[in-house]
Amino acid sequence: MQTASQLAREARAVRPVTEPPIVRAALTLLAIAFLAFFLMVPLAAVFAQALEKGIGAYLAAIREPDAWAAMRLTLLTAAIAVPVNVVFGLVAAWTIAKFEFRGKNLLATLIDLPFAVSPVIAGVVFVLLFGRRGFLGPWLMAHDVKIIFAVPGVVLATLFVTFPFVARELIPLMQASGTDDEEAARSLGASGWQIFSRVTLPAAKWGLLYGVILCNARAMGEFGAVSVVSGHIRGLTNTLPLHVEILYNEYNFQAAFAVASLLSFLAFGTLIAKGWIEWRSRTPESARHEMR
Amino acid sequence: MGISVKNVTKAFGSFVALRDVSLDVPEGELVALLGPSGSGKTSLLRIIAGLDPADAGQILFGGEDATRRDVRARRVGFVFQHYALFRHMTVFENVAFGLRVRARSARVAEEEIRRRVNDLLRLVQLDWLGDRFPSQLSGGQRQRVALARALAVEPKVLLLDEPFGSLDAKVRQELRRWLRRLHDEIHMTGVFVTHDQEEALEVADRVVVMNHGRIEQVGTPEQVFEHPETPFVMNFLGNVNIFHGRVESGKAHLGPISVDYPEHPDAESRPAAGYTRPHEVDLARDESAGGGLWATVRGLNAAGAIVKLELESPQGVIQVEMARDRYEGLQPQLGEQLYVRPQKVRVFVSD
């Protein structure tokens, strides 16, 4: 026969460790409300404004030559920034994770610098360096090289603000995997390049892709640093975010939002790719193997 | 291929891992580097492999100087403690790796690779797991894949770092018997690192006992177990009872126990200690045999083929192990006074 206290103890043991349903519902609702208010509503507003004057006006705003030029420049910038950062990120992460050397911590800290510095300051630094009255300005003028208020400036500024993304993703990943795999490959006769391409890189594959996606998103969306160095020359040095700003300042709201919707599409693409990569990298190789 | 280590020294910052270590590993033997953590055994193995450079000294492979030879050119098979299998490759591809990364001129045809990898997987009894990924294998299976991968490049020497360190006791037992059989089959010169004395004594042809970056003793398992040259070896290779005392004029006086010690014939007295293993102690109800001491039974563990007793004496706790039939003949009881007589005492004079 069971005593009352025994029964009570059992009841307590069976009850799952969790909050009452009402608390759970309230917390979930709060999170959803927050997301809706700060993410969904603005996003809906972008599309509502963009389509305010009908689909024809929307398409016209997108097809406008300056918008096209901005689109091209944005894609060009990303097309340069992303590969350069992949190379830099791999080299930096490889060096920091696999070797011991003096000044390693300093290097790791320097990589974070663009995260710590306001992008506007980064832009100003470039103006001070390459601008007409800047440090290297006279020399550049003499050789007829234009960086500030030209495409190279936009690319440089973007490179600066995006360079931690790939390295930061890879460093912890490579550090965690240690050097055993590389040593094993070396003892099996692999050359440095073979070790990198067959062992290190595949092991860091998903982290690298993730870094690329984040880097790409930032490269396309960067405003502050690019704004300082670009000079806002329509059709020449405007990226999509800068073009949106110009249209907006001209009270051309519909066109501004139409172009902004393009950026939103880029963001969607990025999020989908990010989700896919997270799913792939979380599911172990073996499980996927079985699914096939 | 035999290996010679000549006067190797290695330091990591201020920590000296190896002090002037010399060692010969004869062709075809399986040698264990045995010692506690920090004794330098893994450092020595990595230097032999060429994964780390020695600060001073030489490594000879088959009589040839290999000190400056890169690990790629040393033709060693190295098995890592945590296997270091390539997670993104199947078992088959892991084993094939060493064949695939060869220089174009030395590369073998795909068919040949298939044949060799399958042979090796059969050798380690895993030919049915070729298309699995390492994450799908048990620890023991991973270890065997790592071994097959190391053997694929046809090494002259096999080096294993704590090969069974991260496995549970049962798998470990099986694997070490299997490794011994494998070695008897392929007869490759092998060196493995372990901190488990039982493992070293069971698997190796020769045991190298290390401590504080130095070699304490090299010998067959029987030699190091039965004839330890230093108190450290005696202590590390099994449980011991220690009796402290002095030596003088060819005699060792260790409390109530006295034994001959011809190594110290001088009249001058020196502090010394006598070591005896728990199974080398005799128990009796009377002191007719002499040369022992009385002690009280405080602990008794009769579960197993060997019965373990713990006795309390004025000299401290004495551990005794006896065979089951001897135990049943004597029937010692808890709290009972018994006469303890060490049958074999190894005396070491303190420095």
Image (cartoon, coloured by chain):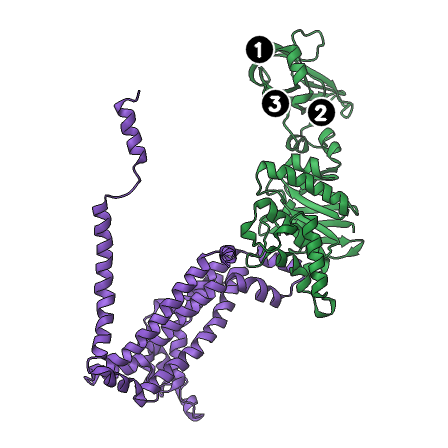
Chain colours: A purple, B green
Indicate the position of residue B115 as horizontal and vertical percent values: 71, 58
Give the labeled residue for mark 1. B333
Marks 1 and 2 sit apart, C-alpha to C-alpha, by: 29 Å
Give the numbered dot on residue A92. Answer: none
Marked residue chain, label 1: B
Residue type at mark 2 is: Arg
Indicate the position of residue B16 as horizontal and vertical percent values: 62, 47
Give the labeled residue for mark 2. B346
Residue type at mark 3 is: Gly
Residue type at mark 1 is: Gln
Are the numbered discs 1 and 3 placed on the same chain, yes or no?
yes
| Residue A269 visible in rendering | yes
Q: Nearer the viewer, mark 2 or mark 3?
A: 3
Above or below residue A264? Residue B287 is: above
Indicate the position of residue A89 as horizontal and vertical percent values: 47, 68
For image coordinates 27% across by 28% down, the residue present is A8
Q: Nearer the viewer, mark 1 or mark 2?
A: 1
Is A116 positioned to the left or the right of B65 in the image? left
Q: Secondary structure at mark 1?
A: loop
Q: Secondary structure at mark 2?
A: strand
Marked residue chain, label 3: B
Marks 1 and 3 sit apart, C-alpha to C-alpha, by: 17 Å
Give the labeled residue for mark 3. B304
Above or below residue A143? Residue B225 is: above
Q: Nearer the viewer, mark 1 or mark 3?
A: 3
